[in-house]
Amino acid sequence: MNFADKLIREHKLNREEYIGLLQQFEQENAGTGMENNSQQSLFRQSAENIGRVKTKYNAANGEHCSLANYLAAEAVRLRQEIYGTDVYVRGLIEFTNICRNDCLYCGIRKSNPHTERYRLTKEEILACCENGYDLGYRTFVLQGGEDGYYTDERLADIVRTIHSAYPDCAITLSVGERSYESYRLLREAGADRYLLRHETANPEHYRMLHPAELSHANRMQCLRNLRSLGYQVGAGFMVGSPYQTTEHLADDLVFLQEFRPEMVGIGPFIPHHDTQFADYPAGSVKLTLFLLSVIRIMLPHVLLPATTALGTMDPLGREKGMLAGANVVMPNLSPVKNRKQYELYDNKICTGEEAAECRGCLAHRMNTVGYQLVSDRGDCKS
Ligand code: 5AD
Ligand code: FES
């Protein structure tokens, strides 16, 4: 069965077919120096099962290419058909690193005593927006830990103020799990979009990455609540997170296919030295790129960032992300004095650069692969 062609033709596969597609990819990359990958046991397993015969695909020009390149070409074709060579920019404001949660993989988890905690004032947040607006950004992403200081009233007030100061901009929130009523108030205050990665679609895997207080069921309920309130919703997961298997990744793909989020954020897992996963291997860049292509083909209109984690694992990660089907970048707008403190994982890039430097850097990087940053809200075209 040719899973790649079926995916291209039908924009969907079932769970077993996704497993087959992922195993074909693993087989192609087995023993090819897939450094940084925590999928090694899977590679061994699939290499034994399937043997090492490399599948060849015919590229548009008639030449043979790998499965990854074959799907990347189709992903880029779809992306360009819908979004041209435009790259949407999201100004990311990391406004608090205080968090009530203890996600096992996360550097700002509450039980990390070494994180120096901070919280931006409303004025500081507005200064970030002003800076971002001047740089041409028309979407602001307010991201933070689950910080109890930001009650519905306080956060809604900030959203309302940004909304009235920049009525031509989209406001995206990324502040974790909150009640339906809270999401409703924030939506009413002017928030347009919400990023809440599902982290893993498999409940057992979810339990291996999170403390008992957090549940997969509540995560999913939050995503449905956000959807029903009219937010453009972003889901996503880490590639190569601890204990992740091929089956888990297939579950993630099936979930995305059914839920059809407007935005999907994926990036390699990167260990943080102060977490219990400090010694776990980071996720694979190649697998992340392959999954970006699969997701683009599955959801052709999706807003798909080449994430900072991808840029951290590979100096050309974000450029490669574009060439795999991504169409969004999320440069940092946070005050430089706080950047190092929002360290979800080790060696995060862009912690010393001013916002304008990141803007210039990304503009150049995107140009090198034939794309250009645009000053636009960057809504989902569908
Ligand atoms: N490596 C990579 N990504 C991480 N995230 C959190 N910790 C890490 C890490 N160690 C991701 C999670 C979260 C998003 C904001 O950052 O998927 O949803
Ligand atoms: Fe920040 Fe390149 S994007 S320095």
Image (cartoon, helix red, strand yellow):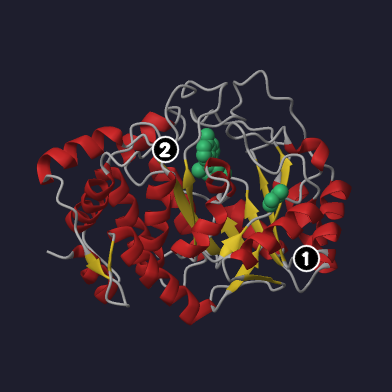
Q: Residue at x 67, y 71 (%)?
A: 377
- In this image, 57 relative to 105: left or right? left
> Closest to the observer: 128 or 317?
317
Looking at the rendered structure, the kind of residue marked 1 is His
- In this image, 188 relative to 16: left or right? right
Mark 2: C-beta under 8 Å from nearest atom of ligand 1: no
Residue 268 position within the rendered picture, expressed as x and y whole percent measured from the top left: 47, 43
Q: Residue at x 54, y 79 (%)?
A: 84
Residue 295 position within the rendered picture, expressed as x and y whole percent measured from the top left: 39, 62
Measure the alpha-carbon separation of dots 2 and 1: 32 Å
> Closest to the observer: 77 or 335?
77
> Closest to the observer: 179 or 266?
266
- Mark 2 or mark 1, earlier in chain: 1
Residue 22 position within the rendered picture, expressed as x and y whole percent measured from the top left: 26, 51
- Callout 2: few (<14), some (14-19), or many (20+) C-alpha neighbours within 10 Å? some
Determine which quarter of the picture holds residue 211. Answer: top left
Question: On the image, numbered disc 1 is attached to which residue?
Answer: 163
Which quadrant: the N terminus? Answer: bottom left
Q: Residue at x 12, y 46 (%)?
A: 50
Marking on residue 194: none
337 shown above or below 112 = below
Would residue 28 be seen by someone viewing this image from the given angle?
yes
Looking at the rendered structure, the kind of residue marked 2 is Ser
Question: On the image, numbered disc 2 is attached to which residue?
Answer: 215
22 shown above or below 107 = below
Residue 342 position within the rendered picture, expressed as x and y whole percent measured from the top left: 68, 36
Element type where label 2 sits in the image: loop
